[in-house]
Image (cartoon, rainbow, N blue to C red):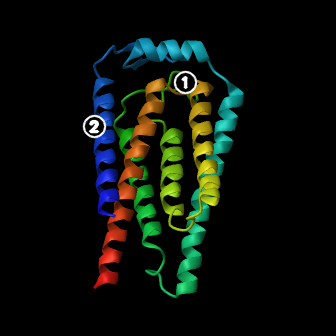
Amino acid sequence: MQKKFLTYSIIAGVLLILFCALTVSLTFVDVREAGESGATVGFATINEAVFDALGQNAICLKLSGLCGKLIIAAVVAFGVTGLVQIIRRKGILRADKELYAMVGGFALFGAAYLLFEVVVINCRPVLEDGELAASYPSTHAMMATVVAGMGAVYLLKYFKTKFWYGLLCGLLVGIACVTVTLRLFSGVHWLTDIAGGVLLGGIIVALYGAACALWGKKKEQGNEG
């Protein structure tokens, strides 16, 4: 468990450095107006090139919204799991600690979302209801990464067989990858918005994994004692 904790911690640190580097760079590297909205954006050349190549796609936008609902359904499923455990074990603190850590992960997601609604780094390449709207990092990309990643870590607790674990994790990761891809192809985000969302989501997942590993270590020490 100590090795897992160290691994997750290192991953979280590396991703944090990459995210911070990307975020800061977006404020001064190749910053100019781009896209149909005329928004000022960092890494404008590559962002505009990708936007021009992919354009806008209403079908991808609708499908990404559908995938978003599937991701929310997964969140509800984990919530129901926790509620069932509380009822069966007769105690609000008797649900899996990993599920409580998951709540913490979603809290971090919410805090990050609110932060970047206030501290606007980039705006969408297209207008939203006739107005500029914050787009960095992509909320869909971040949420998909968080749910798929934390779900994969938690499911390992119950599915030791490779088949069922691989099947469920493959489903979660597959939905996340499709969501991220559709969001990019829909044309409502810059490439760097998607990258930032995945990186920030990855940080939350790594912190969640570290928390679960730390809890597992304490549980083992308690059993030994």
Residue plotted at (29% across, 62% down): 2
Image quadrant assignment for residue 158:
bottom right
Q: Residue at x 39, y 42 (%)?
A: 200
Locate residue 91, reporting x and y percent: 48, 85
Q: Does residue 19 appear left or right of residue 151 in this picture?
A: left
Q: What is the secondary structure assignment of the residue under circle 1?
A: loop
Q: Which mark is residue 127?
A: 1
For residue 40, side relative to residue 51 (left or right): left
Pick the quarter of the image with the C terminus: bottom left
Q: Nearer the viewer, mark 2 or mark 1?
A: 2
Residue at label 2? 17
Q: Quadrant of residue 54?
A: top right
| Residue 207, position as x, y percentages in the image | 35, 54
* Camera sees residue 174: yes
Instruction: Please indicate whether residue 23 sits to the left or right of residue 83 in the image.
Output: left
Is 189 or 185 nearer to us in this picture? 185
Q: Is residue 164 above or below residue 93?
A: above
Disc 2 to disc 1, C-alpha distance: 31 Å
Residue 175 horizontal/vertical position (percent): 62, 44
> Where's residue 88, x and y in %?
58, 85
In the rendered structure, which amino acid carries the disc numbered 1?
Answer: Leu
Rendered view: 185 above or below 170 = above
Write down the quadrant of residue 53 in the picture. top right
Crowd around label 2: few <14 · some 14–19 · many ≥20 (10 Å): some
Please name whichever residue, 55 or 121, is drawn nearer the observer in this view of the structure.
55
Q: Residue at x 37, y 46 (%)?
A: 203
- Along the viewing direction, whichever of 121 and 192 lies nearer the viewer: 192
